[in-house]
Image (cartoon, rainbow, N blue to C red):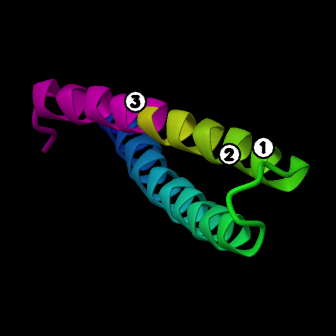
């Protein structure tokens, strides 16, 4: 059972780290979108459309990983103590 606990813990820790990285990338894209909108006076360029799509997908992936992390935390709390 200890092996399963360690595997679950490592998976949830990685999910949390990856979720944070995806949020950072999405926030960076958001800044780029806003800067491009200012340069083009709000006109929707292909860059802006594509960047919005990528940003939204990053937020979605981050949210899915957070839910996965939360499930892992629940499993961790239910796991019997080893020792």
Q: Give the secondary structure at mark 1.
A: helix
Between 51 and 22, the one nearer to me in the picture: 51
Q: How far apart are marks 1 and 3 (CA)?
A: 29 Å
Whole-angstrom CA distance, mark 2 to mark 3, is 24 Å
Viewer-side residue, 70 vs 63: 63
Read off the residue under disc 2: 52
Mark 2 or 3, closer to the camera: 2
Please provide percent x and percent y for residue 52. 68, 45
The vertical placement of 16 against 34, above or below, is above
Q: What is the x, y in percent for residue 77?
A: 12, 33
Q: Quadrant of the C terminus?
A: top left
Q: Is residue 74 magenta?
A: yes
Q: Considering the numbered disc 2 on the image, is that residue within a helix, a strand or a loop?
A: helix
Residue receiving disc 1: 49
- Between 31 and 70, the residue placed more toward the observer is 31
Q: In this view, does 21 lie to the left or right of 39?
A: left
Cβ atoms at labels 1 and 3 below 8 Å apart = no
Label 3: which residue?
Answer: 68
Is 49 displayed left or right of 27 in the figure?
right
Q: Residue at x 81, y 45 (%)?
A: 50
């Amino acid at each position: 059972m200890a092996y399963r606990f360690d595997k679950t813990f490592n998976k949830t820790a990685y999910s949390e780290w990856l979720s944070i990285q995806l949020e950072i990338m999405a926030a960076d894209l958001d800044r780029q979108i806003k800067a491009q909108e200012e340069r083009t006076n709000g006109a929707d360029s292909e860059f802006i459309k594509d960047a919005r799509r990528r940003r939204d997908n990053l937020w979605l992936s981050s949210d899915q990983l957070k839910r996965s992390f939360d499930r892992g935390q629940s499993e961790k709390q239910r796991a019997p103590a080893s020792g």
